[in-house]
Image: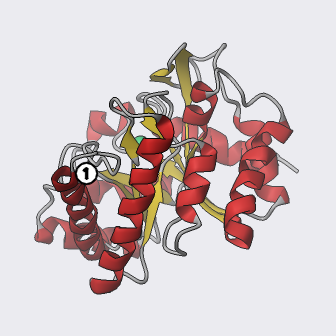
Amino acid sequence: MVRFGPSGFCDKFVEKYSHTEEMPAWLTFHGLDAYEYSFNKGIRITDEKAQSIKKVFEERHISLSVHGPYYINLANPDEEMAEKSKVYIIESLKKMRLMGAKYLVFHPGSLMKMQRNEAFDLVLKRLKELITLLDENGFDDMYICPETMGKHGQVGTVEEVAKMCALDKRIIPTLDFGHINAFGQGCLKTKSDFEDVFMTLKKYMGERFKKVHIHFSKIMYGDKGEIKHLNFDEDEVYGPNFEFLAEVLKEYDIDATVICESRGHQTEDSVKMKQIFQSSD
Ligand SMILES: [Zn+2]
């Protein structure tokens, strides 16, 4: 099954509404069935608010994911700071349980001044420690979803994320195709470019590669990767295009939630992707 929906409030939504509880009706009206809530700047939601969100999203069968705080950095060489990042992940999951959200997206970490492999090894080590914390806190029914990143100074190539996901069945990838394309200077051009992404997952994760979380938007890039998010109307040069991904999702029977992060047009562009998916074969 493939679900579609926006990340956060799009421009048209904020013209009329201001509460997350108003989002499910908006999504149903647009024929969408997923939403990503953001803890980007902090885990500030109250328990009451979390429970009221859960109620309205469940009533309309909207799948809810959460983007974790931007300051999570599992590659931090400082053990104390890395410990805090693990705590932010656990705290996010606790709130998400109240919200009825099962998927936590997070940015694995920054290279800072390290070599790529050094930073990556630190992320793997912290993820292993996190798995123990997931066990201790009874998080068996939730997924943590490391994201593929768009800037060269960040950990999170497709291969790195695949290796992270190989550690435990509760770790599944967030494939951000705009990031993958920006990191690789426009590397996603043909259908087989998209297929290769899934085959890299399969190499490390086996058949578990069929369950993924997806971010999709067009992203402007330069020498060091990602510059900024665009919407579908603004982009003529950078890509990627959704058409080939739609074909690959169908062909491999991928279970995915596709979250749109287009600049200001998250809802409109989610609808466009759903239409492309439904008409592809
Ligand atoms: Zn992200």
Disc 1, SS:
loop
Return the x and y of residue 73 as percentages of the image width and height: 30, 47
Decide which of 101, 54 is in the foreground and name it. 101
* Viewer-closest of 249 and 165: 165
Q: Residues within 10 Å of mark 1 (few under 14, many from 20)?
A: some
Question: Where's residue 240, x and y in %?
Answer: 67, 29
Q: How is the image coloured?
A: secondary structure
Name the residue type under label 1: Phe
Query: Residue 156: where, in percent of width, then height?
Result: 51, 43
Q: Is residue 1 visible?
A: no
Extreme residue toward the right, this view:
281
User: Does residue 18 appear left or right of residue 201 in this picture?
Assistant: left
Q: Is residue 90 above or below residue 157?
A: below
Residue shown at the point (21%, 64%) measured from the top left: 87
Instruction: Give percent across and percent down for residue 98.
Output: 24, 75
Q: Is residue 39 above or below residue 225?
A: below
- Give the quarter of the image for residue 14: top left
According to the image, label 1 marks what residue? 39
Q: Is residue 192 left or right of residue 114?
A: right
Please name the residue shown 49% across and 27% down the image: 152
Query: Is residue 127 visible in this depiction of the protein?
Result: yes
Q: How many marks?
A: 1
Snapshot quadrant of residue 18: top left
Ligand 1 quadrant in view? top left
Instruction: Write the residue at 77% across / 38% down.
Output: 243
Label 1 near ligand 1 (CB < 8 Å): no
The quarter of the rendered structure image containing the N terminus is bottom right
Residue found at x 53% / y 69%: 167
